[in-house]
Image: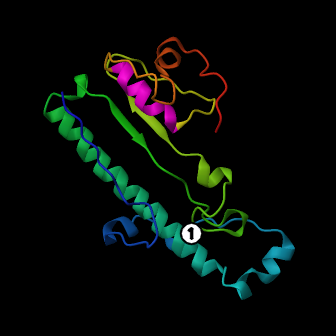
Amino acid sequence: PFLCIACFYSPHAPWVVPQRFLDMYDREALPLPDYPPEVEAVRAERGFNDERLRSARHGNYSMVSEVDHHVGCILATLEASRLADNTIVVFTSDHGDMMGSHRLLAKTVSYEESERVPWLMRIPGVPGRTIEEPVSHIDLVPTLLDLMGSKAGESLPGKSLVPCIRDQRSPGPVFV
């Protein structure tokens, strides 16, 4: 048995990323948010201009592509080492980014753009499934322990989502 945790700083300001990933996107063609006329009239004078938004989006998109590249390398190594069929892979993030929504950058407040994050799992022998209902990161450790045949202790918060994953049940209400 082994555990490997690969933590990526990206995507995160400052937008420092190898040029080959920056070159994947035409900075000037990136979409910008639509703002109400009263916001549009004053946002440039408040330093929230198109250049700043394009710079943040360009950096973010490029960093996402860089992470995608490195995750691909990890998955390819698992395949080449014949470990993929016996390895649970989890991909998640601690927060999203506003990217100009609500006239904000970064993760300054709890809007959906900064709160909703990916939680992807590849579980050997379990067909893929999308869970539409919200779930919480607090359930990640109990879920992994359950998948490995171990039960979470009474003091460990959260619940295993394995029944939901295997039987396609709803995870039930969750405080998110």
Residue at image point 66% right, 84% down: 47
Residue at image point 56% right, 73% down: 54
Magenta stretch mostly in which secondary structure?
A: helix
Residue at image point 33% right, 18% down: 150
Residue 145 among those drawn in magenta: yes
Q: In which quarter of the image is the N terminus?
A: top left
Instruction: Please give the range of residues in magenta.
Output: 137-147
Q: Residue furthest left?
A: 81
Total marks placed:
1
Residue 92 among those drawn in magenta: no
Position of residue 107 in the picture relative to residue 22 (left or right) = right
Residue at image point 32% right, 15% down: 149
* Residue 25 or residue 144, whichever sits in front: 144
Q: Which residue lies furthest to the bottom in this view?
A: 45
Residue 147 in which image quadrant: top left
Q: Is mark 1 on a helix, strand or loop?
A: helix
Q: Is 162 located above or below residue 15 in the figure?
A: above
Q: Name the residue under label 1.
A: 29
Q: Where is residue 130 in the image (x, y as percent from the top left)?
A: 54, 27
